[in-house]
Image (spheres, rainbow, N blue to C red):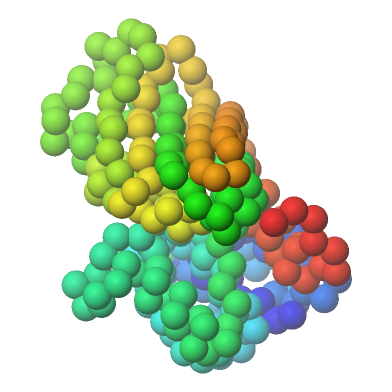
Amino acid sequence: MNIGIIGCGTIGSELAKSIEKFNGVSIVALCDVDEEKAKKLLLQLSTKPQIVGIDKLIEISELVIESASKHIVKEVAEKTLFKGKDLMIMSVGGLIGNDPHISAPIYEHIFKLAEKNNCKLYIPSGAICGLDGVNSASIGKINSVTLTTTKPPKALEGAPYIVKNKINLNTITTKTIIFEGSALEAVDAFPANINVAASLSIAGIGAEKTKVKIVADPNTGKNMHEIVVEGVFGKLTTSTENLPSPNNPKTSYLAVLSAISMVKKIVGNVKVGN
Ligand SMILES: NC(=O)c1ccc[n+]([C@@H]2O[C@H](COP(=O)([O-])OP(=O)(O)OC[C@H]3O[C@@H](n4cnc5c(N)ncnc54)[C@H](O)[C@@H]3O)[C@@H](O)[C@H]2O)c1
């Protein structure tokens, strides 16, 4: 499978270095807005992909992997699917929210394009666990989905919701709920937290119905995500305590591993779990 990677940062680089060893994988193209990042990655690969722009990358790839930014997700998805190529998206936050030019939520528009052009669209679990159960549960009726994300106060610094409400994170001495709202509201309030909320919303009951709680805990150094889902199947609870990836404290290491695992599933012969 000829693979092109858009975004040669933490996820893109670790992913490329791992998957080039998989049977049947050939990395043919790299793209990054910062060409130095693509060049640096190229030097670490034993295969020699071309460094190209987005359009050329899509042209020569069978599977396009986006690991760049939520701001390019819609453009990359439309171009890739229109060309009949498969796509894996890491910046899942770019799929939720509304776009003034389309009536449905962005992900519904993109899913329809994938169907129309007979392409596969892959969204890895990223930094959370439990999407296998949510996928199964969504075949029946799900009544509620809640994501509680707990972070050290300093990890929430600069979030638009914190700035707008003039919340002084330095005064927090005990575990404190900072925000409660829908995943859709969380898009603008806490954009850095949006990937996990987006994946969960898409797998479950949508961004308007998925509840998100953001908790500041001065006694933790980790980013934690707890998911509770209730439906006709019963109740599901998962808890993930993430360590940061070695090269980027903002990206949970599990998200990197999840991307690699997804490619392994795509090219592999055995698929375990939903
Ligand atoms: N699904 C999840 O759970 C999850 C978890 C962590 C990160 N992410 C998302 O995955 C993406 C990559 O994460 P990362 O940790 O590798 O980030 P990173 O900042 O380390 O790397 C991103 C790379 O993309 C490049 N880039 C940015 N905009 C671009 C554009 N318009 N065109 C081409 N290249 C561009 C940057 O120059 C950089 O090299 C981010 O959007 C991040 O939010 C998702």
Q: Quadrant of the C terminus?
A: bottom right
- Can residue 55 be seen in this snapshot? no
User: Is 1 left or right of 65, judged from the image as shown?
Assistant: right
Q: Nearer the viewer, residue 36 or 63?
A: 63
- Can residue 139 be seen in this snapshot? yes
Could you say which quadrant of the image residue 206 lies in? Answer: bottom left
Q: Position of residue 182 (x, y in %)?
A: 30, 44
Q: Nearer the viewer, residue 82 or 274?
A: 274
Indicate whether 266 appears above or below 18. Answer: below
Looking at this rendering, what residue extends furthest in the front direction?
A: 232
User: Is 272 left or right of 5, judged from the image as shown?
Assistant: right
User: Is 262 left or right of 166, judged from the image as shown?
Assistant: right
Q: Position of residue 166 (x, y in %)?
A: 14, 27
Could you say which quadrant of the image residue 120 lies in? Answer: bottom right
Q: Position of residue 66 (x, y in %)?
A: 52, 67
Residue drawn at x 74%, y 80% is 1
Residue drawn at x 25%, y 46% is 185
Indicate whether 141 appears above or below 213. Answer: below
Looking at this rendering, what residue extends furthest in the top direction?
A: 173
Q: Position of residue 11 (x, y in %)?
A: 58, 54
Indicate whether 88 appears above or below 225. Answer: below
Residue drawn at x 26%, y 65% is 98
